[in-house]
Image (cartoon, helix red, strand yellow):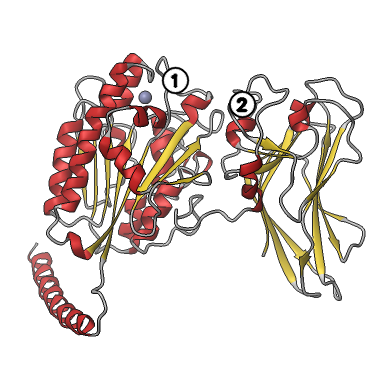
Amino acid sequence: MPTAVLSGRTLAVAATATALLATALGATAATAGESAATTDKVLVIGIDGAVLDRVKAANAPHLNGLMAQGLTARSTLYANPMAATSSGPGWSTIATGVWPDKHGVKDNSFTGKNYTAHPDFLTRIENAKPSLNTYAAADWEPITSTDQNGPIFSAKVDKRLSLKGDRDGYGSEDPKIAAAAATELRDQNPDAAFVYLGEIDAAGHSSGAASQAYLDAVARVDVLVGKLLTAVQSRPTYAQENWKVLVTTDHGHTSGGGHGGSSIAERGTFVIARGAGIPAGSVRDDVRLADVAATALAHVGVSGAGLDGVPLNAPDSDPFDTLRPVLQARVDETGIPAGTKGFTHTPPAGWSVDNSKMGTGGVTEWAGWAFATDEFWSQSQRDQWRELNVRSRDVFAVADSDEWDDKSHTGTFDSTLITPKWPVAGGTAKTLSFQTHYRQEAGQTAQVLVSYNGGAPAVVKSYTADAVAKAESIALQVPAGATDVQVRFRYSGNNNWYWTVDDVRLG
Ligand SMILES: [Zn+2]
């Protein structure tokens, strides 16, 4: 329409004037010895069904180069009944920055999707900063096309490319996707881009992650990743730009091929990130898949408030995570691989565990509150919702009377986790927050108790129903005259379920 053309011309003139002004300012800044402002840009490369150990084993110099130049973080997914380890939930989690209990996608039917409340990160960028250029390309239709049950990336994205692979419906068009995306990245001006490559997953399904064919597919996709990286670095304005590159995957694969289930191989994912401020060759244990969107948003200055994910540049400061160096391998839990170090009974500095009411014996790993990783704890027994503990990060506290009861013991499980004494001001309001995952059965007790200045602990919360991967928040009114507070988490039970607690904070 003429009006639109006119306003476009007006905008272009304004942009030119701004550019001239910026040049003048830049010259002034340079005179003063300061560097000119850079433009923040982000590229997210999504590789379907990629297994990190196989990427490391493959002839994949670009992906392994990104790991050497940036950070590598393994993490684990949910399983059913929260969501299957399949592409719909995986890419939805990556794109939206929230877990399936919020975005609603539980499998590839996309039934229950709620992208209206939880849009993809490119749409969030368009909503907050419409002048930024967004781009998405994929050869799995639900990512960018309305032809199937998606699209995960909405029509608000400035430019979307969707190709339908002719072999399995995805993967076979990777070279065309990569070529088109490389042209866009080099010759146009995207501020945030998502590029999906599917061939590795197709090879996993046909030949298994342990196969040579899978390694060959990783090598071919690595060439395409290299083309994308070269395109970014070939931009004429690259020297004035601050690019963050993220690589991630939506789920793992079994050695024989396949995913969707709850095995640790199927639940395995990773995030690789390269950019300013990220230490070369770094490894993180506190990163989760929802952090990809949060990181992309933060990089271009758009708020990710309310997301489950947090930007990679804000590491988790949870005291439980300081225990990772002392984590031990299994003792009685024969279902957990012998090489997996993932539990300890040693609390972090200032914390304690009161086991004076515990029976004796039982499974060693779970004799009273323990501190464990998701990889370790969830493998103690699959498909009992332990995989749903998605809002814990790295090491968390766990009281599991169900697993403890699997070996002969006296008495019952009755253990109390005790925080340090935190200073407080009398008469003030405080908020006790923590991430929790609790499964209820009659006969269990799960209580949060608070004590001021060493007084008798008073119950402030009792769990009497399931609390699945819940962000808990409890209001505390500090009594007049109180100078410190101590919080207790008491769990008792037998052949029942469990309780986890993580990231306990007094705000
Ligand atoms: Zn697949």
Query: Label 1 sits on what residue type?
Result: Thr
Secondary structure under the numbered disc 1 in the rendered image: loop
How many discs mark residues in the rendered view? 2
Q: Which residue is mark 1?
A: 254
Relative to 72, is 370 on the left or the right? right
| Dot 2 crowding, Cα within 10 Å, few <14, some 14–19, many 20+ | some
Of 325 and 83, nearer the camera is 325
- Image mark for residue 379: 2
| Dot 1 crowding, Cα within 10 Å, few <14, some 14–19, many 20+ | many
Q: Position of residue 492 (x, y in %)?
A: 84, 37
Q: Residue at x 21, y 29 (%)?
A: 164
Q: Residue at x 19, y 22 (%)?
A: 166
Relative to 300, is 163 on the left or the right? left
Asked if the residue at label 2 sits under 8 Å from ligand 1, the reply is no
Q: Residue at x 32, y 52 (%)?
A: 122
Using the rendered image of the protein, determine whether residue 69 is visible from the camera's viewpoint.
Answer: yes
Residue 481 sits above or below residue 208 on the image: below
Q: Residue at x 18, y 59 (%)?
A: 238
Q: Position of residue 367 (x, y in %)?
A: 80, 33
Query: Label 2 sits on what residue type?
Result: Gln
Q: Position of residue 356 (x, y in %)?
A: 91, 41
- Image mark for residue 361: none
Of 479 and 52, nearer the camera is 52
